[in-house]
Image (cartoon, rainbow, N blue to C red):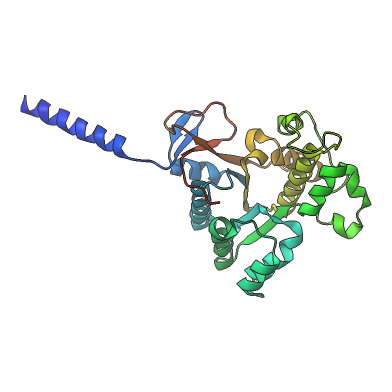
Amino acid sequence: MKNISFVFTLLFLFTNYIFSQKPAYVIYHNGNKVEWQDLLKAADSCDVIFFGELHNNPIAHWLEYELVKDLYQKYSNSLILGAEMFETDNQLILNEYLNNLINEKNFLEEAKLWQNFQTDYRPLVEFAKKNNLQFIATNIPRRYAAAVNYGSFAALNKFPKEALTFIAPLPIPFDSTLDCYASLRQMPAMGRAHTTKLYLDQAQAIKDATMAWNIMKNLADNKKFIHFNGAYHSDYHQSIIWYLNYYMKETKNYNYKLLTITVQEVDNIEIPPLGNPADFIILTPNTLTKTY
């Protein structure tokens, strides 16, 4: 009887301990809870890893850093980093900083950095700098995306050849039926004049195409490319991944393997997510303090 009481006491204490914890995230794969090591193991067999973040989510940024750190321990300089947050016309200054040719002050003043660079992306850049890793600026310069937004893909034909070196090759293939683009056409006018036609779907597509093109150009045998982008740009294997598949088939016919990660904020991280937008889904509480 004493033994039974002791067992129930232990169960009570263990249960109380579990429910008193405040886990910051839970990882799911095919609807089941998995561990961080499971994600790392899956990454072993992949050539490209897409980490789809929520831009102001602190857990996402911390895990991005941890992913790079853990994979570096296995793959060292075979690792390549790339990010939506850096535009192609900033590759030169990014390289200069990574190679210690310019100081941080000049880099911060002259590069087009996101407002949350210091808290969220600087750790990745500094890791790459310390460990001599390539860091690829994959995104289109925002002025060209804005031109497409107001004038469609046709607006790019007006730019000189020098400008087009920062963009995926023209003409840009475009599947307007993809959910990621069709949904943008359903968005409200957001206060703009209803007579002004915008091409938000094509503006997003030119970003996706350019990011995919730069990932493809920098893929190499025995290398592993980790790309950081908003979850929108890699969820459901659309957006960047649609373009990457297109370019790989057109230029290399390369049978590559990829892994996708996405982050979601929810009320209860213990409830499995609906659907499978990515191979691994990281749920975080929606009460997290934001980075901006």
Instruction: Give the quadrant of the N terminus.
Output: top left
Above-or-below relation of 211 to 121: above
Q: Whole-percent x and y of residue 83?
A: 65, 52
Q: Whole-percent x and y of residue 94?
A: 68, 65
Q: Residue 26 appears in which quarter of the rendering? A: top left
Above-or-below relation of 14 to 209: above
Residue at image position (62%, 72%) is 105
Extreme-left residue of the structure: 2
Q: Residue 128 appears in which quarter of the rendering? A: bottom right
Residue at image position (88%, 43%) is 151
Q: Is residue 143 left or right of residue 221?
A: right
Q: Is residue 207 left or right of residue 230?
A: right
Q: Is residue 167 left or right of residue 229?
A: right
* Callout count: 0
Q: Is residue 28 visible?
A: yes
| 220 or 136: nearer the viewer | 136
| 216 or 243: nearer the viewer | 243
Q: Is residue 274 left or right of residue 6?
A: right
Residue at image position (84%, 57%) is 165
Extreme-top residue of the structure: 1
Q: Whole-percent x and y of residue 232?
A: 65, 39
Q: Whole-percent x and y of residue 248?
A: 75, 43
Q: Is residue 248 visible?
A: no
